[in-house]
Amino acid sequence: MVDFGGWDMPLQYGSQIAEHHAVRRGAGVFDVSHMCIVDLEGARVRPFLLGLLANDVGKLKASGKALYGCMLNETGGVIDDLIVYFLDESRFRAVVNAGTRDKDLAWMRQHAARFGVELRERTDLAMLAVQGPEARGKAASLMSPTGAPAALALEPFFGREIDGWFIARTGYTGEDGFEIMLPATAAERVWKALNATGVLSCGLGARDTLRLEAGMNLYGNDMDESTHPFESGLGWTVALEPPGRAFVGREALEAIRARGPQRKLVGLLLSDRGVLRAHQRVLLADAGAGEITSGTFSPTLERSIALARVPAAAGERVQVDIRGKLHDARIVRPPFVRHGKALVS
Amino acid sequence: MSNVPSDLKYTKTHEWLRTLPDGTVEVGITDHAQHALGDLVFVEVPETGRKLSAGEPFAVVESVKAASDVYSPVAGEVIAGNPGLAAEPEAINSDAYGKGWLMRLRPAAAAAPSLLTPAEYQKLIAEEGG
């Protein structure tokens, strides 16, 4: 067990690598109840979020549709990344990171005040992420005769209240699956029921190798308040259209975009044996340097992979300083793996 | 509870040593050590002929979590590094005292070093919480 953002969580239940393969090939379940679920309620929730988030909730028109994006500070630095679900015009649900919970809630409350929006943290809910090609089928097998087909009908990046659970077809692994928000009192029973259908218990170790293979960022490693989305691989989550939408950090991002970002976040693939790790120095041929933000061993590729922040002009070939020795690595575009298959060779 | 076989000797740095009938020794890392490291992904074993002093690092074991040096319990000459570990580093996790052996060594004809008995090693890891 390790301390993760103030929560006691297991790194693995058995073998971290076996847990990783279970998610890529079958189904695994993660206890992600440390994440913070916040319901945002009021007549003016939508305008509140339009001004708060760098991504545009104006895109959310169908009930249940989800959006991934960032909250920025005034200088364009990332306060947190989060998912927001549109439920109805007076209710959205946000899921934010555990480690940034206090900061995020204070920031949101501060900005919500003038819109009369209420924030209700749902500490009554647990969250289980069931992920893998067999995940949705196995999770649905625990539901009622009407609930199961409703859950299986969910489209990607949609969430719905079904049989008293909020089921979202989202995840942090690069596989299909559900993130299920359910009464905390039911969580243990449901976990054991999932195990009984063949869903393997998976810990933080596998969570990290899966998300990194999928090219997904981890707040605190790959971005933080000192980095902006364009140098964090998150430019795709910033909606500068429509030009009339004011949001916190917009001016700063426009200035950065006009100057041209100095750095970029890239994927790295290590050719030799060895493991890339956060904070290792990345050296470029023309004497520029960068740093690894997240690194690990990829069980699917059987090679080490990483995300790294490097000068914007970096080409394909770099070297990484691993414990005092330089190793050749290649810059590649994440994700490294999709639907269980390697995207890089 | 970690497995600590009664027919081996141990070091404070979590290596085990087995004396073979011909007087050579076999060395690896203990069950306690493999458990602390987690799934091993790369192992570097020494080359045949290399001469080692007692306490000298002779191998590197790398897991997703961390890379760790492995130290020679005794002085001597390497007669074999385990060739199977390149393809199957996880053998150390599943069979630390058998298939997971790291090297075989011909000990130097010097005074016997102070290695731990199984009971002493048990006590050490109990103190470390293992």
Image (cartoon, grey):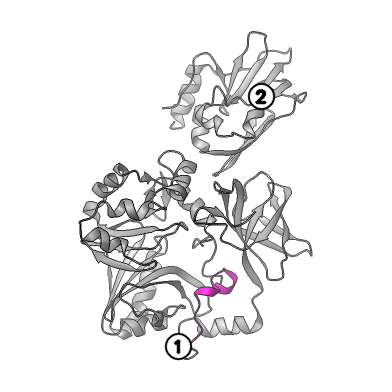
Instruction: Residue A228: say if magenta.
Output: yes
Is residue B37 inside the magenta stretch? no
Image location (x, y in percent) of residue A19:
44, 44
Residue situated in front as seen by the camera: A144 or A4: A144
Q: Residue furthest top?
A: B21
Amino acid type indicated by mark 2: Met
Mark 2–mark 1 Cα distance, whole angstroms, equals 66 Å
Q: Is residue A125 visible?
A: no
In the image, which residues are magenta?
A221-241
Give percent across and percent down for residue A313.
72, 70
Both marks 2 and 1 on one chain: no
**Residue A92 visible (yes or no):** yes
Q: Name the residue under label 1.
A: A245
* Quadrant assignment for the C terminus of chain B: top left
Of A74 and A187, nearer the camera is A187
Label at residue B103: 2
